[in-house]
Amino acid sequence: MELIGLMLSLLLAAPAVEAGQTTGRNGHGLLGYGILMYDPACAFACRDTISPLLNCSTTSGNTMNKYKRMDMSGGSGNGPGVDLPPGNGWMVMPADPDCKAQNDFFLQTSAYCIYSRCQHVQISKLESYWATWLVGNHADQPVPKMSYGQALQAVGKPPTRPLNNSMLLNYTASVTDDQWVANFNADWNFALAEYTHERFGLVVFLTGAVIPVGLSLLRFFPWPAAWMNIVRYYLIDPPLFGSRHAVSALWGFGVVPTRGQALFIAYLWIVNIALTASGHKTVWPHSWFSSLSQEVESYVGNRTGLLSFANLPLVMLYAGRNNVLLWLTSWSRSTFILLHRWIAVICMLQAVLHSVIYLHMYTVGAVGYDYGSESRLPYWYWGIVGTLALALLIPASIQPFRTKLYEAFLVSHVVLSTLALIGCFLHIYYRFERQWGYETWLYISAGIWAFDRVARLAKAASNGIKRVHITILDDEYMQLDIAGVTASGHVYLHFPTLSTWKLWESHPFSVAASSVHHTFSDDDVERLQQRLFVGQGQAQVRGLEKPQGNLEISTSPPPSSEKVMSRSSGITLFVRRHSGITASLATNAAGSGTAASSAGLPVLVESSYMTRGLTVLQEESIDCRGFSNVICIAGGVGITTILPVLDELSRLTRHGSTAKVYWGVRSWALVHAVERLIESRDGDFGSGSEAGGAGTFKRQWGGVEVSLSVDQRFDAGQLVNSELSDREHSGTTFVVSGPASMADDVRSAIFSREKCATPLQVPRVRLVVESFSW
Ligand SMILES: *[C@@H]1O[C@H](CO)[C@@H](O)[C@H](O)[C@H]1NC(C)=O
Ligand SMILES: *[C@@H]1O[C@H](CO)[C@@H](O)[C@H](O)[C@H]1NC(C)=O
Ligand SMILES: *[C@@H]1O[C@H](CO)[C@@H](O)[C@H](O)[C@H]1NC(C)=O
């Protein structure tokens, strides 16, 4: 995190130096947490009050423009026109830091003001304030020629003549309460407001991260099962309204969240709105604002800016593939992606509000700003860049665009997100440099993002470049075998040679089997060798007879020893042909036959990522919690998430529970390929080998009852109803892995309300959906 900050600041140091600017006093932390603003406020109020004309030496050079204003106060302290003519080597002017540091009257007036107003503050603190802040905001600004103690001694008797900022200060002046109080109020209250902004920002960020963890941990608490069931049945798992959740609704622009998701999204909105609107304390008189409404407007403007920053790390956190929240919670990745979208919208709206409020304040001339000159400053236009990038990210990420133009979406998403971060950073940097720690939020955001990217790289790099062998099963399905990799759950594949434009793309696939567990008997070896013999000539062309589980033998002469085979490892994936990357794969495989392509297509395997179904079933086998029955419903290649848990399922059946698999599939080719895979793993399990027509068929896979529904419509709703009526009161987990519409059919069948008249009749049921529909 710090590293990123360092890199960013190194990167940005160059233009700053070029522009002749200086480095502010860097703060570390956040305002109120490691960084204090206007502390001690009594002394800062003296500094803000004492801005007279001074008799300045012209030989030290007019440094007025060398230091840009870096505090928050609006007034720039320029007096009215100077009517005293300059002399040789001196002139009377609004004082700059060099002049103030050398001017006796300024130093003595300041010392007496501080002495009389800061009786309760330690001398050492006042001395350090004197040395670092009295004449300016920058680290390299001159140190006053005398210390606070020396200046105070030089005052002698208490001054009586009041300060007049529009006159030359050629005496030691006294600062009246009238002059000082408005500035004290401004500094003190502004700093408090800033601390509040940061505190509220922390509330938004930390609760956004911790609440999902806390809610997930609740599942380990021994709640009465009936309560949990009712809560889950009515409040968590059904769609917020209607019967669609996975399939996009709202004219294709979004999905209807489940009620549980909706509750958390509602929380995010409520906490953001409440913390934007509350906690604004005003004081009067206030030297920066001409009315209370101006003061409130300014605080709300700063609050929205800060909360937008505080939401940014959440945006990154929810989006991550390698994500602490995925490891610590029971929430799925598709839930977090949904939250990512919602929090991004909130983050963007906060940024837009911030910009609009400041635009309004400047155009009506509040706080002494002039829109014409402010709008030409770098901080202003980088702020516009950041806000625009955030705003553009939303339309560039809508579902129709995402699905139809995935590549364009991916590129624009990364480019605009980077631009948003850079815009926000430069906005802060050019305005305050790194004094107030606002950039800490950006470091955290960039750090979370970088962590995910580095973890992805590391996961892919640790496997190295592998070869994928593509077998076309039929018009619909392909089998991908990758040797020398072990993985479970799902993996992301990068195909570096498929297209240069798609170099950075990676696509999720679930691992049907990892052949590292294979133990081949002598019979198996023989059978595989025989099959290989048949397959070698035709495997790539017909694609049906390619041996499973061992890729080395498919490209080399059959090995003579059993050892070679049992040592080999690899993963097998099944893929349905769509447009996009899968179509390119199919084309690539179809065009094979040359020596190069029979060696396989280079692939980077980013592995492994856990799937929810796997986790749930593994938790399940430890502690059944009254959900001992498992009904898996798979569509097409969705079967791949079910295959790895067959062992868990058969263990359940041995303990007297029900475990069933329903699989709707379009063609026999995939059925055969899958069964060959299971066979190579479990040995011959005596599956029927009938092939051909459509219909429903029964199978036994490793002791698990499987109902195949080949090439015919699969009524998931009816299936759920019949399974539920069979087992009304013993708990059932439905695991769905397949097309979004299938997942929705199952969900609405389970949660359609008319089935249960009273909460007590709620079936004891739980739904786990494996989805790639991000
Ligand atoms: C300013 O200071 C110079 C000497 O440093 C002096 O000669 C000059 O009279 C002063 N001007 C005013 C207006 O006091
Ligand atoms: C300050 O001086 C100006 C003349 O330069 C005078 O008009 C004004 O009244 C004075 N203000 C105070 C508060 O003495
Ligand atoms: C201070 O400056 C004023 C001009 O602004 C002048 O009239 C006055 O005599 C000066 N006083 C002293 C003590 O130098």
Image (spheres, grey):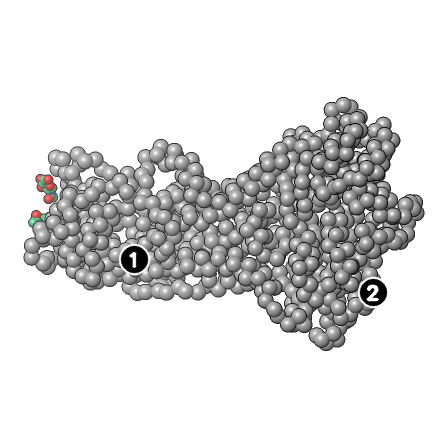
Task: Say whether residue 334 is left or right of residue 728.
Answer: left
Residue 260 in the image, given as x and y percentages of width and height: 63, 63
Which residue sits at x=82%, y=61%?
Answer: 719
**Vertical placement of residue 194 versus 321, above or below:** below
Residue situated in front as seen by the camera: 62 or 32: 32
- If the picture is divided into quarters, which one holds ligand 1? top left
- Evaluate whether residue 251 shows in this view: no
**Vertical placement of residue 488 versus 256, above or below:** above
Q: Which image quarter is the N terminus in?
A: top left
Query: Which amino acid, by three-letter code, is at mark 2?
Result: Ser
Residue situated in front as seen by the camera: 278 or 123: 123
Query: Which badge, 2 or 1, comes first in the chain's sequence?
Result: 1
- What numbered label is drawn on residue 187? 1
**Vertical placement of residue 212 versus 101, above or below:** below
Label 2: few (<14), some or many (≥20) within 10 Å? few
Secondary structure state at the residue bearing disc 1: helix
The residue that disc 2 covers is: 722
Which residue sits at x=70%, y=40%?
Answer: 516
**Vertical placement of residue 15 versus 725, above or below:** above
Is the CB of mark 1 within 8 Å of ligand 2?
Answer: no
Label 1: few (<14), some or many (≥20) within 10 Å? many
Secondary structure state at the residue bearing disc 2: helix
Residue situated in front as seen by the camera: 255 or 319: 319
Which residue sits at x=63%, y=52%?
Answer: 333
Task: Say whether residue 635 is left or right of residue 437.
Answer: right
Number of on-image labels: 2
**Distance Cα–Cα, label 2 vs label 1:** 70 Å
- Tell me which corner region of the image, top left, top right, bottom left or bottom right, holds residue 3: top left
Residue 730 in the image, given as x and y percentages of width and height: 75, 68
Residue 365 in the image, given as x and y percentages of width and height: 37, 53
